[in-house]
Amino acid sequence: MSVARPRILHVALLVTMMASLLAACGTVSGTTTSGGQQRTIIHLGYFPNLTHAVALVGVQQGIFALALGSNVKLETTTFNAGPVLIEALFARSIDIGYVGPSPAINGFVKSNGAALRIVAGASSGGALFVVRPGADIHSPQDLANKKFASPQLGGTQDVALRYYLQQHGLKTTDQGGNVRVVPTDNGTILSLFKQGKIDGAWVPEPWATRLVTEDHGKIFVDERAVWSGSKFATTVVVVRKDFSDQHPDLVKKFLQGHVAAVQYIQTHATETLTILNSEINQITGQKLMATAELSEAFDNLDITYDPLAATVSQQADRAYSLGFIKSKSQLNDLCDLGPLNAVLFSKGLAQVSGT
């Protein structure tokens, strides 16, 4: 024992010193070496949903990699819902992410504006409230004493569901009401719906259409119907602020790839659906969707690089009314669209508004 103890102390000291060195260097986890050449690593997060089509296509087609260049390595992580992605961004595991506006807003407020910025849009629409035929739901009043699901507490669809209930004089059980909302992942929502264990769900595509086509669900609310002009931000692109401050050139290059991926989707409809079906299947393990089913789901949304900033502001109002954020005073700096507008100008495209 008298010999082993100094060795243990020596090893522990080395571990402590190495941990301190890595923490001090900060950028070590953000670089890699290949063939004697140092490459920057960008960590990208997104979901296996149609509303994240730009990310799925941009990665699979190599559009992002081409825009970023050979000195950058893109590493990807997929998530089920936004709050978890924002936590990963807080932990510096994600540099750029595709996420719903509500988690982005919550992350911005929670960090006092220090954590992230919205730098582009990715999709509008593509979220629906689908109810089970046997639930006997025909009007908002019929939602009382029912059980519904959303992808995650505080996520964009979760806020939409709770706000809709609030607007119709209903409260969830955690607010002293009689409507139960169960946040769970999209694949499980599909299973619970088929088993009759939930009465409905507010979910993004393709999950909404799958509830309809695979188990005769009824569309109770197409969220586009509750927004002026039927347009609202479903997915936005967020960047970790310290990453953006350190690598503004890489953010601009990524946005070049983002705009190129949007343009690819808008001009390659058939190829896009094939890519999305394959990618979602590979990530989730769910069966491939029928082409007609997938096409129907994709028709429920618009792909756009415009973040529709005015609707993001409205979603902040809704999150505030539900108690998900405590203040709206800092939100003026949430959107930083200068880099995107520079990319759009260089391509001869109309710029987008930050208000």
Image (cartoon, helix red, strand yellow):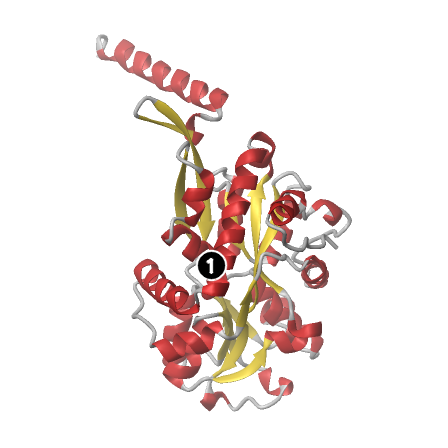
Name the one closer to the observer, 159 or 125: 125
Image position, residue 69 (x, y; %): 43, 37
- What is the quadrant of the N terminus in the image? top left
Side of 28 where 238 appears, left or right: right
Q: How far across and down, in percent of the image, does residue 129 sit?
A: 54, 77
Of the residues shown, which amino acid type is indicated by label 1? Tyr
**Percent from the top left, x then y, of residue 267?**
48, 64
* Local SS, label 1: helix
Question: Measured along the vertical axis of the image, is residue 353 above or below residue 23?
Answer: below
**What residue lies at 64% left-to-right and 44% top-to-bottom?**
342
In the image, residue 300 sits, relative to residue 283, either above or below, namely: below
Residue 107 in sight:
no
- Counting every numbered tag in the picture gives 1
Q: In this orientation, which residue lies closer to the viewer: 178 or 190?
A: 190
Residue at the right extreme of this rendering: 329
The residue positioned 59% from the left and 49% from the top of the image is 347
Q: How would you rate the neighbour count of disc 1 (Cα within 10 Å): few for under 14, some for 14-19, many for 20 or more? A: some
The residue positioned 73% from the left and 49% from the top of the image is: 331
Q: Residue furthest front?
A: 348
Q: Quadrant of residue 40?
A: top left
The residue where tag 1 is placed is: 264
Q: Say which quadrant the C terminus sits in.
A: bottom right
Point out residue 195 in the picture as x, y percentages from the top left corner: 36, 80
Q: Which residue is pictured at 70% across the width and 64% down the height?
A: 318
